Image (cartoon, rainbow, N blue to C red):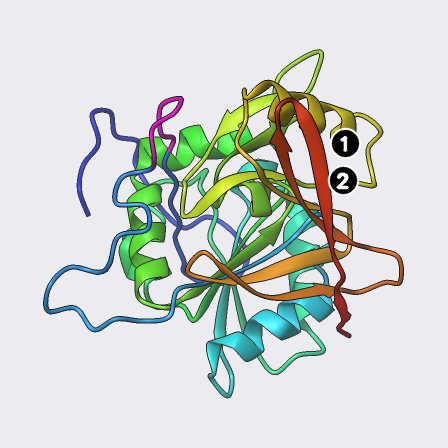
Protein backbone atom coordinates (compact mmCIF):
# COMPACT_ATOMS: atom_id res chain seq x y z
CA UNK A 1 0.00 0.00 0.00
CA UNK A 2 1.38 3.43 -0.96
CA UNK A 3 2.41 5.81 1.79
CA UNK A 4 0.84 9.26 1.89
CA UNK A 5 2.54 12.57 2.57
CA UNK A 6 1.45 12.13 6.13
CA UNK A 7 0.85 8.73 7.59
CA UNK A 8 -1.22 7.66 10.53
CA UNK A 9 -0.70 4.19 11.99
CA UNK A 10 -3.44 1.70 11.14
CA UNK A 11 -4.88 -1.31 12.91
CA UNK A 12 -7.97 -3.26 13.80
CA UNK A 13 -9.87 -2.04 16.77
CA UNK A 14 -13.29 -3.35 17.45
CA UNK A 15 -15.53 -6.24 18.07
CA UNK A 16 -15.63 -8.34 14.99
CA UNK A 17 -13.02 -9.28 12.47
CA UNK A 18 -10.33 -7.79 10.26
CA UNK A 19 -11.06 -5.30 7.49
CA UNK A 20 -9.98 -2.02 5.93
CA UNK A 21 -11.14 0.97 3.83
CA UNK A 22 -10.22 4.04 1.75
CA UNK A 23 -11.19 7.46 0.35
CA UNK A 24 -10.00 10.29 -1.90
CA UNK A 25 -10.79 13.98 -1.89
CA UNK A 26 -10.30 15.49 -5.35
CA UNK A 27 -9.79 19.25 -5.59
CA UNK A 28 -12.72 21.41 -6.65
CA UNK A 29 -13.58 20.70 -10.26
CA UNK A 30 -11.06 17.87 -10.76
CA UNK A 31 -11.99 14.20 -11.00
CA UNK A 32 -10.72 11.63 -8.55
CA UNK A 33 -7.50 9.95 -9.72
CA UNK A 34 -8.27 7.34 -12.40
CA UNK A 35 -12.04 7.82 -11.91
CA UNK A 36 -13.86 5.87 -14.58
CA UNK A 37 -10.61 4.40 -15.95
CA UNK A 38 -10.27 0.69 -16.79
CA UNK A 39 -8.11 -1.61 -14.65
CA UNK A 40 -4.40 -1.76 -15.34
CA UNK A 41 -3.12 -3.93 -18.19
CA UNK A 42 -3.06 -7.59 -17.31
CA UNK A 43 -5.73 -7.21 -14.61
CA UNK A 44 -8.97 -9.05 -15.49
CA UNK A 45 -11.90 -6.67 -15.84
CA UNK A 46 -14.47 -7.01 -13.05
CA UNK A 47 -17.94 -5.54 -12.83
CA UNK A 48 -17.62 -2.59 -10.45
CA UNK A 49 -20.64 -2.45 -8.13
CA UNK A 50 -22.00 0.11 -5.65
CA UNK A 51 -25.34 -0.07 -3.80
CA UNK A 52 -26.34 3.14 -2.01
CA UNK A 53 -29.32 4.38 0.01
CA UNK A 54 -30.29 7.90 1.04
CA UNK A 55 -30.67 6.77 4.64
CA UNK A 56 -31.45 3.53 6.45
CA UNK A 57 -29.09 0.71 5.41
CA UNK A 58 -30.80 -2.11 7.28
CA UNK A 59 -31.19 -5.83 6.72
CA UNK A 60 -32.96 -5.50 3.35
CA UNK A 61 -30.17 -3.46 1.79
CA UNK A 62 -27.48 -5.69 3.31
CA UNK A 63 -29.30 -8.75 1.93
CA UNK A 64 -29.35 -7.23 -1.55
CA UNK A 65 -25.67 -6.26 -1.32
CA UNK A 66 -24.86 -9.82 -0.24
CA UNK A 67 -26.73 -11.17 -3.28
CA UNK A 68 -24.74 -8.86 -5.56
CA UNK A 69 -21.49 -10.49 -4.42
CA UNK A 70 -22.57 -13.79 -5.98
CA UNK A 71 -21.06 -15.67 -3.03
CA UNK A 72 -22.96 -18.29 -0.97
CA UNK A 73 -21.84 -16.83 2.39
CA UNK A 74 -20.12 -13.54 1.63
CA UNK A 75 -17.71 -11.75 3.91
CA UNK A 76 -19.09 -8.27 4.54
CA UNK A 77 -17.11 -5.48 6.20
CA UNK A 78 -18.54 -2.46 8.03
CA UNK A 79 -16.42 0.72 8.04
CA UNK A 80 -17.70 3.04 10.79
CA UNK A 81 -15.17 5.83 10.15
CA UNK A 82 -17.77 8.56 9.63
CA UNK A 83 -19.37 7.72 12.97
CA UNK A 84 -16.01 7.82 14.79
CA UNK A 85 -16.22 4.03 15.19
CA UNK A 86 -19.48 4.31 17.12
CA UNK A 87 -20.17 1.24 19.26
CA UNK A 88 -23.90 1.75 18.73
CA UNK A 89 -23.47 1.55 14.96
CA UNK A 90 -21.35 -1.57 15.27
CA UNK A 91 -24.01 -3.29 17.37
CA UNK A 92 -26.67 -2.31 14.82
CA UNK A 93 -24.51 -3.74 12.02
CA UNK A 94 -24.23 -7.15 13.65
CA UNK A 95 -27.92 -7.09 14.55
CA UNK A 96 -28.91 -6.29 10.95
CA UNK A 97 -26.66 -9.04 9.62
CA UNK A 98 -27.93 -11.65 12.08
CA UNK A 99 -30.89 -12.90 9.95
CA UNK A 100 -28.64 -13.30 6.89
CA UNK A 101 -26.26 -16.02 5.77
CA UNK A 102 -23.24 -13.70 5.75
CA UNK A 103 -19.95 -13.41 7.61
CA UNK A 104 -20.00 -9.91 9.16
CA UNK A 105 -16.81 -8.04 9.98
CA UNK A 106 -15.95 -4.62 11.38
CA UNK A 107 -12.92 -2.45 10.62
CA UNK A 108 -12.32 0.51 12.87
CA UNK A 109 -10.07 3.39 11.87
CA UNK A 110 -9.21 4.57 15.39
CA UNK A 111 -6.71 1.79 15.97
CA UNK A 112 -3.19 0.98 17.18
CA UNK A 113 -0.48 -0.93 15.33
CA UNK A 114 0.17 -2.98 18.47
CA UNK A 115 -3.30 -4.51 18.10
CA UNK A 116 -3.82 -4.68 14.32
CA UNK A 117 -1.21 -6.62 12.37
CA UNK A 118 -2.92 -6.67 8.98
CA UNK A 119 -2.80 -3.71 6.60
CA UNK A 120 -5.89 -1.99 5.26
CA UNK A 121 -5.35 -3.72 1.92
CA UNK A 122 -4.98 -7.18 3.50
CA UNK A 123 -8.26 -6.74 5.34
CA UNK A 124 -10.40 -4.90 2.80
CA UNK A 125 -9.36 -6.79 -0.27
CA UNK A 126 -10.20 -10.08 1.45
CA UNK A 127 -13.87 -9.03 1.65
CA UNK A 128 -16.76 -9.64 -0.74
CA UNK A 129 -18.63 -6.47 0.26
CA UNK A 130 -17.82 -3.24 2.14
CA UNK A 131 -20.44 -0.99 3.77
CA UNK A 132 -19.49 2.51 4.91
CA UNK A 133 -21.35 3.98 7.89
CA UNK A 134 -23.27 7.22 8.14
CA UNK A 135 -21.87 10.16 10.09
CA UNK A 136 -19.52 13.03 9.31
CA UNK A 137 -18.50 12.73 5.64
CA UNK A 138 -15.81 15.42 5.80
CA UNK A 139 -14.02 13.69 8.68
CA UNK A 140 -14.45 10.30 7.01
CA UNK A 141 -12.76 11.56 3.85
CA UNK A 142 -9.90 13.19 5.75
CA UNK A 143 -9.17 10.02 7.74
CA UNK A 144 -9.39 7.75 4.70
CA UNK A 145 -7.04 10.03 2.81
CA UNK A 146 -4.54 10.24 5.67
CA UNK A 147 -4.50 6.46 6.09
CA UNK A 148 -4.34 5.60 2.39
CA UNK A 149 -7.67 3.83 2.69
CA UNK A 150 -8.98 5.70 -0.35
CA UNK A 151 -6.49 3.85 -2.57
CA UNK A 152 -7.52 0.50 -1.11
CA UNK A 153 -11.21 1.17 -1.67
CA UNK A 154 -10.44 2.01 -5.28
CA UNK A 155 -8.69 -1.35 -5.63
CA UNK A 156 -11.66 -3.06 -4.02
CA UNK A 157 -14.07 -1.41 -6.48
CA UNK A 158 -11.88 -2.35 -9.46
CA UNK A 159 -11.79 -5.97 -8.26
CA UNK A 160 -15.58 -6.24 -8.10
CA UNK A 161 -15.91 -6.11 -4.32
CA UNK A 162 -19.38 -4.64 -3.77
CA UNK A 163 -19.36 -1.23 -2.06
CA UNK A 164 -22.29 0.44 -0.32
CA UNK A 165 -23.76 2.48 2.48
CA UNK A 166 -26.25 5.23 3.32
CA UNK A 167 -25.88 8.91 4.23
CA UNK A 168 -22.12 9.50 4.53
CA UNK A 169 -21.84 5.91 3.34
CA UNK A 170 -23.58 6.79 0.06
CA UNK A 171 -22.18 10.27 -0.41
CA UNK A 172 -18.58 9.08 -0.11
CA UNK A 173 -18.58 7.26 -3.47
CA UNK A 174 -19.57 10.32 -5.57
CA UNK A 175 -17.50 13.25 -6.79
CA UNK A 176 -19.34 15.67 -4.51
CA UNK A 177 -22.52 16.28 -2.57
CA UNK A 178 -24.27 18.12 0.23
CA UNK A 179 -23.09 17.52 3.77
CA UNK A 180 -23.92 18.63 7.31
CA UNK A 181 -20.31 17.95 8.35
CA UNK A 182 -19.54 21.63 9.01
CA UNK A 183 -21.17 24.09 11.42
CA UNK A 184 -24.19 26.27 10.60
CA UNK A 185 -25.42 24.99 7.23
CA UNK A 186 -25.26 22.35 4.53
CA UNK A 187 -22.15 22.72 2.38
CA UNK A 188 -20.35 20.95 -0.47
CA UNK A 189 -18.03 18.04 0.29
CA UNK A 190 -15.61 16.48 -2.21
CA UNK A 191 -15.44 12.69 -2.09
CA UNK A 192 -13.91 9.65 -3.82
CA UNK A 193 -15.34 10.25 -7.28
CA UNK A 194 -15.97 6.61 -8.19
CA UNK A 195 -19.49 7.65 -9.21
CA UNK A 196 -19.62 10.70 -11.47
CA UNK A 197 -21.67 13.74 -10.49
CA UNK A 198 -23.23 14.73 -7.18
CA UNK A 199 -25.45 13.20 -4.52
CA UNK A 200 -27.91 14.30 -1.85
CA UNK A 201 -28.89 11.76 0.83
CA UNK A 202 -31.86 12.22 3.22
CA UNK A 203 -33.78 14.03 0.48
CA UNK A 204 -37.14 13.66 2.22
CA UNK A 205 -35.78 13.36 5.74
CA UNK A 206 -34.28 16.80 6.36
CA UNK A 207 -35.99 20.05 5.37
CA UNK A 208 -32.89 21.82 4.01
CA UNK A 209 -31.70 19.02 1.73
CA UNK A 210 -33.93 19.59 -1.31
CA UNK A 211 -33.74 23.42 -1.53
CA UNK A 212 -29.99 23.42 -0.93
CA UNK A 213 -29.40 20.77 -3.59
CA UNK A 214 -31.56 22.71 -6.06
CA UNK A 215 -29.76 25.98 -5.33
CA UNK A 216 -26.28 24.53 -5.74
CA UNK A 217 -27.11 22.74 -8.99
CA UNK A 218 -29.02 25.70 -10.44
CA UNK A 219 -26.09 28.05 -9.74
CA UNK A 220 -23.54 25.69 -11.26
CA UNK A 221 -21.73 25.31 -7.95
CA UNK A 222 -22.52 21.58 -7.98
CA UNK A 223 -22.85 19.05 -10.77
CA UNK A 224 -26.13 17.34 -11.59
CA UNK A 225 -26.70 14.10 -9.72
CA UNK A 226 -28.86 11.72 -7.73
CA UNK A 227 -30.99 12.49 -4.70
CA UNK A 228 -32.28 9.63 -2.57
CA UNK A 229 -35.04 9.68 0.01
CA UNK A 230 -34.44 7.74 3.19
CA UNK A 231 -35.06 4.00 2.56
CA UNK A 232 -34.55 4.42 -1.21
CA UNK A 233 -31.42 3.70 -3.16
CA UNK A 234 -29.60 2.91 -6.39
CA UNK A 235 -27.51 0.00 -7.61
CA UNK A 236 -24.74 1.10 -9.98
CA UNK A 237 -22.55 -1.01 -12.22
CA UNK A 238 -19.60 1.24 -13.04
CA UNK A 239 -21.51 4.50 -13.54
CA UNK A 240 -24.68 3.00 -14.97
CA UNK A 241 -27.89 2.85 -12.94
CA UNK A 242 -28.92 -0.80 -13.04
CA UNK A 243 -31.75 -0.82 -10.51
CA UNK A 244 -33.59 1.61 -8.23
CA UNK A 245 -34.92 0.12 -4.99
CA UNK A 246 -36.73 1.03 -1.77
CA UNK A 247 -37.75 -0.61 1.47
CA UNK A 248 -40.92 1.43 2.04
CA UNK A 249 -43.76 2.82 -0.04
CA UNK A 250 -43.37 6.44 -1.07
CA UNK A 251 -39.57 6.52 -0.91
CA UNK A 252 -38.14 7.75 -4.21
CA UNK A 253 -34.97 8.52 -6.11
CA UNK A 254 -34.48 11.57 -8.35
CA UNK A 255 -32.06 12.67 -11.01
CA UNK A 256 -31.63 16.41 -10.47
CA UNK A 257 -30.18 18.66 -13.18
CA UNK A 258 -30.44 22.26 -14.36
CA UNK A 259 -30.60 24.14 -17.65
CA UNK A 260 -30.46 27.91 -17.82
CA UNK A 261 -30.79 28.11 -14.04
CA UNK A 262 -34.00 26.04 -14.03
CA UNK A 263 -33.88 22.83 -12.00
CA UNK A 264 -35.49 19.62 -13.21
CA UNK A 265 -36.23 16.60 -11.02
CA UNK A 266 -36.70 13.32 -12.87
CA UNK A 267 -38.32 10.71 -10.65
CA UNK A 268 -36.82 7.23 -10.74
CA UNK A 269 -39.51 4.93 -9.38
CA UNK A 270 -38.05 2.19 -7.19
CA UNK A 271 -38.82 -1.50 -6.86
CA UNK A 272 -39.56 -2.76 -3.36
CA UNK A 273 -37.01 -5.02 -1.71
CA UNK A 274 -37.33 -6.80 1.63
Q: Which residues are magenta?
A: 25-31
Question: What is the distance, in whole Å, between disc 1 and disc 2 at their CAs?
Answer: 6 Å
Q: Is residue 113 above or below residue 93?
A: above
The quadrant holding residue 104 is bottom right
Residue 201: percent from the left, percent from the top? 68, 41
Residue 144: percent from the left, percent from the top? 39, 37
SS of the residue under disc 1: helix
Q: Is residue 31 above or below residue 73?
A: above
Q: Is residue 223 left or right of residue 228?
A: left
> In the image, what residue occupies the spot 50% across and 88% down?
72
Judged from this view, the residue extending furthest toward the bottom is: 72
Asked whether the viewer can see residue 96, the reply is no
> In the image, what residue occupies the spot 57% across and 36% down?
224
Cβ–Cβ below 8 Å for labels 1 and 2? yes
Judged from this view, the residue extending furthest toward the left is: 42
Q: Nearer the viewer, residue 102 or 203?
A: 203
Of the 4 image quadrants, the one containing the C terminus is bottom right
30 is within the stretch colored magenta: yes
> In the image, what residue occupies the spot 40% across and 68% down?
127
Q: Nearer the viewer, residue 245 or 69?
A: 245
Q: Which residue is mark 1?
A: 210
Task: Specify few, some or many for label 1: CA neighbours under 10 Å numbering under 14, 14-19, or 20 or more.
Answer: some
Q: Is residue 256 above or below residue 272?
A: above
Who comes first in sequence, dot 1 or dot 2? 2
Q: Which residue is mark 2?
A: 203
Residue 258: percent from the left, percent from the top? 63, 31
Amino acid sequence: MKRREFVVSSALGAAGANLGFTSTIPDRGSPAPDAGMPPAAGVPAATRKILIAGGGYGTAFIRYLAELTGKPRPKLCYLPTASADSAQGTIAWFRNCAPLDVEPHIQESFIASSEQKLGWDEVLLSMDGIVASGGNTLNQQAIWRAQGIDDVLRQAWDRGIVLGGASAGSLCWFEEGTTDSRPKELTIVKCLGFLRGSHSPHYDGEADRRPTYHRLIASGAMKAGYACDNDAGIYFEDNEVKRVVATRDGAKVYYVSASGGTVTERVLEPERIA
